[in-house]
Image (cartoon, helix red, strand yellow):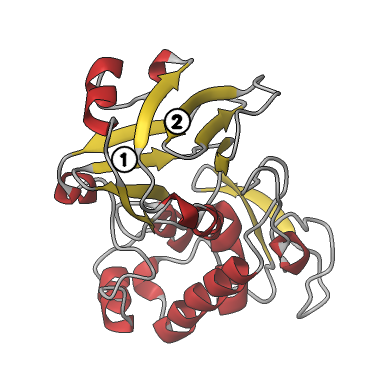
Amino acid sequence: MPELPEVQTVVNSLSKLENKKIIFFESYYSKIIYNLNHSSFTKNILNKRVVDVFRKGKYILIKLNKGYLVCHLRMTGQLFLSDKMPENKNYMRAFFKLNKGFMIYNDIRKFGGFYYFNNINDFNLKVGVDPFDKEFTLNWLTKGLLSRSRSIKHLLLDQKFVCGLGNIYIDEILWMSKIHPQRKSDKIKNTKVLYDSILFILNNSINHHGTTIINFTFDNMKTGDFKNKLKVYGREGLLCYQCENKIIKEKIASRSTHYCQYCQK
């Protein structure tokens, strides 16, 4: 699933969407709209002008001159701009005709889709604090960890706590922080290391356009290259870059988790 850096990469690629007007919408999959029926969704977005495109957690938010068009890519969603309709429509699940060009939504597994909200506060109820929100401070994180007693891997996966992190980046962050993924959150002493690691890893991945392992693409089939920078995720059985013992992979918090049992305590 695309995580914060991948979604930010898509948002960056949609910058030319600003000031475009949506003049037609069509979908080819009935479940692609989450909170409204097709007719109501279409009525709310047609002839609306795009004011801004930004991100919250793993969600893409397209601010219109009235309301918000919101997209979640889930596992294999791809949202991109095109001057013309693609010839290959095998995985096209929806498209938005603009006053100039198109916005295309492809999705192999059909898990992703769209919302429409009149008010941004209605959307904000769905997610926690974004690592790039002004609310995300060292003090906030420290208080949040101390007030809970959950495994740190499980807690960081909770989108109601911190939104945007997923399996790849949590493994990378915990390895850099030298924190075992099963460590209880209220037992973590050096929260500054964790806080700094979160921001460092996310910013570094954004600078490399995210991580493409299988499906992630942006701007019509471009790929991210942060995969080449991964220190622990996907490296089970290989040697840890810090201590040269083997990286372990096991299921923690119902997710495949990669860590070094010698470096991470």
In-image side of 125 versus 198 (left or right): left
Q: Which mark is residue 69?
A: 1
Instruction: Sort mark 1 into few (<14), some (14-19) or many (20+) by Cα contacts within 10 Å.
Output: many
Q: Nearer the viewer, mark 2 or mark 1?
A: 2
Circle 2 is placed at which residue position?
A: 97
Q: Residue furthest front?
A: 99
- Residue 178 seen in the current view: no
Q: Which is nearer the eye, 202 or 102? A: 102
Q: Can you tell which quarter of the image residue 113 is in?
A: top left
Please tell me which of labels 2 and 1 falls first in the chain: 1
In-image side of 192 versus 143 (left or right): right
Label 1 residue SS: strand
Please state, as top left, top right, bottom left or bottom right, where the C terminus lies in the image. bottom right
Does 195 appear above or below 23?
below
Disc 2 marks a residue whose amino acid type is: Lys
Label 2 residue SS: strand
In-image side of 202 versus 228 (left or right): left
- Residue 30 seen in the current view: yes
Q: Can you tell which quarter of the image residue 210 is in?
A: bottom right
Q: Position of residue 167 (x, y in %)?
A: 56, 53
Q: Position of residue 191 (x, y in %)?
A: 41, 81
Q: Position of residue 148 (x, y in %)?
A: 28, 63
Q: Can you tell which quarter of the image residue 201 is in?
A: bottom right
Does 73 appear above or below 128?
above
Q: Which residue is rendered at x = 51% and y = 35% of the image? A: 102
